[in-house]
Image: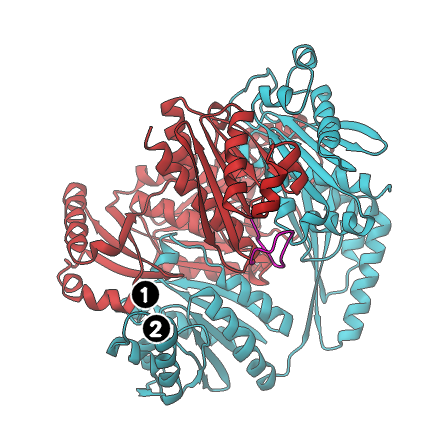
Chain colours: A cyan, B red
Amino acid sequence: MQAEIITIGDEILIGQIIDTNSAFISKELNKTGVSVYQITSVQDEKEHILQALSEAEDRADIIIITGGLGPTKDDITKHTICEYFNDTLVQNDEVLAHVEELFARYISTPISEVNRRQALVPSKAVALMNKFGTAPGMWLEKNGKVFVSLPGVPYEMRALITDEVLPRVRQKFELPFILHKTVLTYGMGESAIAEKIESWENDLPSYIKLAYLPNLGKVRLRLTAKGKDKELIEKEVDKRVESLRQIIGDIIYGTENDHSIEFLIGSLLTEKGMTLATAESCTGGKIAERITAQAGASAYFKGSVVSYATEVKTNILGVPEAAIKEHSVVSARVAEEMAKNVRQLLKTDFAISTTGNAGPSKGESDAEVGTVFIGIASPEGIFSFEANMGNHREKVINKTANKAFELLQKEILKF
Amino acid sequence: MQAEIITIGDEILIGQIIDTNSAFISKELNKTGVSVYQITSVQDEKEHILQALSEAEDRADIIIITGGLGPTKDDITKHTICEYFNDTLVQNDEVLAHVEELFARYISTPISEVNRRQALVPSKAVALMNKFGTAPGMWLEKNGKVFVSLPGVPYEMRALITDEVLPRVRQKFELPFILHKTVLTYGMGESAIAEKIESWENDLPSYIKLAYLPNLGKVRLRLTAKGKDKELIEKEVDKRVESLRQIIGDIIYGTENDHSIEFLIGSLLTEKGMTLATAESCTGGKIAERITAQAGASAYFKGSVVSYATEVKTNILGVPEAAIKEHSVVSARVAEEMAKNVRQLLKTDFAISTTGNAGPSKGESDAEVGTVFIGIASPEGIFSFEANMGNHREKVINKTANKAFELLQKEILKF
């Protein structure tokens, strides 16, 4: 079963918004057993939309269209779909009552003729009620194929996909089972991994595909299996992951697709009842921010001293000025002092520190752009790690954060 | 001049990653005078890529392809492009030297045959040097049309677009001028605005298009003009915005700008020679992280105390325990103490503080989920701002950071 997604809107093609809808729809369809063959973004232009619909109909069984359902002149999706289906618009009373209720309850301006027109839908369509907005979704069928038109506002679209579209898709089609399992690794490049697991990869059955997803010092290995027998597929994928562990178990830090390393660290610390602080220079708060993006972080994260200026390292963190003079502010010694002292200052079990030069130009020290020291303090002692994280500021910051989480996780696992 | 973007990678079609590359490329092409007609995302599958290339060639003058250039088996873009151009791969010595240098400098694993193969490019292609990675970009021409293949890693792709692709596009094609101007409004729905400005909209010349972009209580009105005469277009768009102000000036709060607010704040502080610190609770380092993501931040940013635990607010920031007892940790008083004290502690001109409950559940205080206080300290005094930022953790953190930057910018402008 193949689907295609067509997103409509000039704002996507001029780069004013990032299309997050397609990723959500793709993920949900995949979980339901529908592969997405292609995603196409087109302008608010009738001929172009008609062409995209016709091309998609040739290739896919399910065509999901988002965007262009607003009440204003630039929104032409509904009329274009009507034309594609040789249909006319008729008033849907249930939608009209809903639009009137939304206006009465939440909107201060009075309802107008333009708003009431949101209740017009093609006569051949089933209207899908949009509880968060005025534009209904529309479900149309043609030669056994399904066309679904949805509003582009993300939270309206998401609710319609979950509550209205997926149940109907499951009812209409007999779907295969699709399983994605992603193995998370750190500390080795994708080509080095590929060489190590070459014969394992060649041995995979044809219904299991492998993909390498490298990202700033981490490589995700994604296994995708598809077939009718759910049990067989789950068993086979588990078996393959197990045999993968025998080859590269030392660099695997998790398998759950949706969990970040900061989530896993949070779970570990919560489980052990231990706490964490950070002292960040070159990462500028990035590590703290990623930790506190997790719900429940207050159970194990006490805080951070972002010591961007050298004087903050000495005055607040108590790094001895002599150490900075002797070793430079970007050094193993300073990283270790920062980690040790922030751990004492904030009274935690663990601490991470970072000091380095994220670029683009050399800072107060003579360190090369990209040189970074990470310090880790634990109840058993302090150590530091040195690396060159490259010559791109954003990359240096993120790779440093990733590496710090990797070092910390290994350390926590000792307790 | 029309372009199309083809993004290649199963990870997009299963919803594992959000395609942010297309938005960047679209925006940059638009600024250069190239419209993007369509964006197509396809799987790592030869026939599908070949079909997408051929369809795009029929419609566009410039075809930008991203993704699928990694060294592993699942990356097939380079071979497929070679097939499309009836070409063969040849070794590019400059690329090889670069790959070898990257490995020597930044990568701990030894270079392998697989890595060296990154230096193979189609014989008809101009290799575009990728300073941040091993996969070169490729520029190919065919019947006056241009095909550019770029790696999918965002920061590598971005540098290649800016440094290599756009200068070549400008040199090869004579480009029109495209101007986007977005007027920001709040407090009125899109259909109400549409009714109010109907005759203004009807009066727009044919080369100016209007779009409505509603988002959570705000509506952005985007004017897009295209033509040869840059001066005429700028003048006409300014005139139309001016006449729009006469009709709905009361709901217009600004026009959109390409620079992030943290960039603008950095420029202001650098210009004035003034400095900044933050004391963050509910934003957990997000504000510091956004500031230090800017190159040159060390000129004006001294650091942050991320006081996630209450004891860090008292011990490090010196917020009086009595104030917390009397007002609760989520209060105007605590926000003001935090801002005042971190400004003194880090000896800066300005300070931002945040305290609140980002959710999903209630924290140490009794404050509703979403309640946030932002404190601002300047050489002239301290004030705070209260708001409820909603019931979604990520949204609360980001809205709070945005609001803090907005308050700070207004404050800096007084000096």
Compared to residue A258, the image places residue A61 above or below, namely below
Report if residue A362 is visible in the image.
yes
Query: Label 2 crowding class (10 Å Cα cut-off): few <14, some 14-19, many 20+?
Result: many
Helix, strand or loop at mark 1:
loop
Q: Position of residue B55 (x, y in %)?
A: 41, 62
Pointer 1 and pointer 2: residues touching (CB < 8 Å)? yes
Q: Position of residue A413 (x, y in %)?
A: 83, 44
Q: Position of residue B254 (x, y in %)?
A: 29, 48
Residue B360: quarter of image: bottom right
Q: Which residues are magenta?
A: B356-368
Q: Nearer the viewer, residue A281 or A247?
A: A281
Q: Which mark is residue A44?
A: 1
- Residue highlighted by disc 2: A77
Q: Locate residue A389 relative to residue B349 in the image: left or right.
A: right
Chain of residue at mark 1: A
Q: Nearer the viewer, residue A186 or B119?
A: A186
Residue B122 lies in the magenta-colored region: no
Report if residue B130 is visible in the image.
no
Helix, strand or loop at mark 2:
helix
Q: Main secondary structure of the magenta part?
A: loop
Query: Label 1 crowding class (10 Å Cα cut-off): few <14, some 14-19, many 20+?
Result: many
Q: Locate residue B117 relative to residue B259 in the image: left or right.
A: right
Disc on the earlier residue, 1 or 2: 1
Q: Locate residue A313 relative to residue A165 in the image: left or right.
A: right
Q: Position of residue A121 (x, y in %)?
A: 35, 83
Q: Which mark is residue B290?
A: none
Chain of residue at mark 2: A
Question: Are labels 1 and 2 on one chain?
Answer: yes
Question: Which quadrant of the rendered structure holds the C terminus of chain B?
Answer: top left
Residue B360 lies in the magenta-colored region: yes
Q: How many marks?
A: 2
Measuring 57% from the left and 55% from the top, which residue is drawn there? B367
